[in-house]
Image (tube, grey):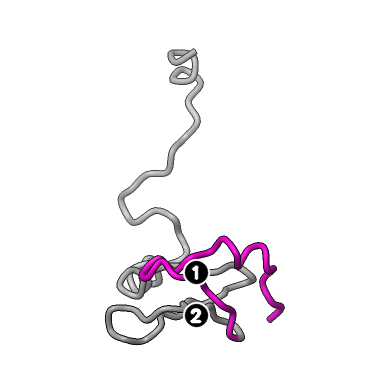
Amino acid sequence: MPNLSPSLLAVLRCPVTGSALVQDGDELVATAPGPDGAAPRYAIEDGIPVLLPPEHLQAAQSAGSGQHGPGIPSAQHDDSTAQEHA
């Protein structure tokens, strides 16, 4: 896994601790401990940091590859609505 650019790492912060992140292989690690005393770790998938707190990561993974859950329709383009707002 290539390293993330220093300019990107300079602006990223841990969503749990608010501390800076450092790259450790295929993960980013917070520079401050979390509430449990351990530094939170975040995966880098396809070069993109996944900065979800651990309690939200499981829910995101179980949601699958779709962006919308079941029963939530995708937005559809409707010219009549667009004309009403013009």
Place of residue 39 in the rendered image (x, y in percent of width and height, measured from the top left): 40, 83
Label 2: how many residues lie within 10 Å, few (<14), some (14-19) or many (20+)?
many
Q: Is-magenta flag for residue 63? A: no
* Image position of 65 (left or right of 59): right
Q: Secondary structure at mark 1?
A: loop
* Image position of 51 (left or right of 46): left
When asked about the image quadrant of residue 1, the answer is: bottom right
Q: Which residue is mark 1?
A: 50
Tag on residue 29?
Answer: 2
- Frontmost of labels 2 and 1 is 2
Residue 10 higher or lower than 81, as above or below: below
When asked about the image quadrant of residue 19, the answer is: bottom left
The boundaries of the magenta stretch are 1-24
> Residue visible at 45% across and 59% down?
66
Instruction: Judge by depth and name the residue closer to the eye, 72 or 29.
Output: 29
Q: Amino acid at mark 2?
A: Val
